[in-house]
Image: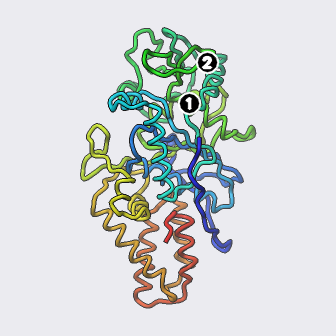
Amino acid sequence: MKSWPEVYIPTIDSRFNIPALNLFNTESSKIEELPKKQIYRMYVCGITPYDSTHLGHAATYLTFDLINRYLRATMAEVRFVENITDIDDPLLERANRDGVDWHVLAESQIELFREDMTALHVIPPKFYIGAVEAINLVTKKIDELDAAGSIYSLENDLYFRVHQDPDFGARSHLSHNDHLQIFSERGGDPDRVGKEDPLDSLVWLSKRENEPGWESKHGIGRPGWHIECCAIALNYLEPAAADDYLIDIQGGGKDLIFPHHEMSASQAKVSTGRDFARMYVHAGMIGLNGQKMSKSLGNLVFVSKLIKDGVSPMTIRCALIMHPYSEDRMWTDELLFEAKEFLDSLIVQISQIDCAPTDEVIQKMINSLSNNLDTPGVITILKDWIKQSQNGETGGNPGELSRAIDSFLGIAI
């Protein structure tokens, strides 16, 4: 599938020290150092294209864009892969509701997503892969799981035995009752009669009436959700045989911790015998004016609508990184105003010939980001620099600071 255009990333002078990146690992429930390497493998779960890019999506993809930028600044190669679930129940349901072809709906929303990511200066993935184009990979992965004795059939549908993975549940830290409840709320079928275990996950859904299906050795049907990401990640990221982990980072929003990331990791573990990700990193949820932002409540704020209304994409980007990435937070008009006011002040000072010293500011920015992407700390550092410049301090290099802000934060001034 076509990705979006490459993003220019300014280089950082070698006199600046770039420490190892520390991130909160959901599996260990603590901040850990990501070892310095020449190649990083990062997989980020993409959208199901039945609605435009909302701010929750944007906050997630900006989080992993910051990680991508930081790791690239260490002169490492970042192999970044993202999927798009271009066939799934929510997409079919929305298409039926609106009386449109599901494929047309998906294509329109995928193109809008590309436009939004381009506007927000998000680095495109090396491989941007749809579920439909990965069906052969899915059937191959099912075969591997079957060879490990972890697949069974139920009325021509195929299920994965989740407890074949001895570590199942260790990544999400939830009780069995929570597993059942969340699984039911997020696309699972714990109450289906005939399953060996309520939490077993669907890997192949046989074709239903009036639904699309694809030919395969498993019959006509389509992939389950979790197997899709497992198959795409392991194929396109090409895990190194000598590494203890198949990939370095599995990323997405907090709502993917369970069941999606737990189950795709279990499928990877059972099919390969190796641990899936070194770190599981999750972005917080975005609410609106004190309420959870969701499709069911009808209170989503869309990136494209904000841009159409005249809001600068850089202001949106700034507003979304003004709070810790992993914390749930609210979107308000006041936050947008605060981000615009900050950027306006920053642009004024960076546009001057003389400004306050910048070397220490850049190093402090880098150090702050190395500490679990402390973007609020970076904003504070830049606000202090603005005040120093306004007070007449000189000796800085505004161009170099501008390039550092662009390189690490993705904010082009």
Tell me whether the residue at label 2 lies in contact with that at label 1, contact meaning CB atoms closer than 8 angstroms.
no
Give the CA separation, mark 2 to mark 1: 12 Å
- How many residues crowd mark 2 within 10 Å: few (<14), some (14–19), many (20+)? few
Total labels: the figure holds 2
Residue 237, how many percent across, how many down?
66, 41
The dot on residue 132 is 1
Residue farthest along the right direction in this orientation: 242
Can residue 257 be seen in this snapshot? no
The picture quadrant where one finds residue 347 is: bottom left
The kind of residue tagged 2 is Ser
The kind of residue tagged 1 is Val
Q: Which of marks 2 and 1 is nearer the N terminus?
A: 1
Residue annotated with mark 2: 216
Left or right of 120, for residue 359: right
Compared with residue 21, is residue 405 higher up or lower down, i.e. above or below?
below
SS at mark 2 in the image: loop
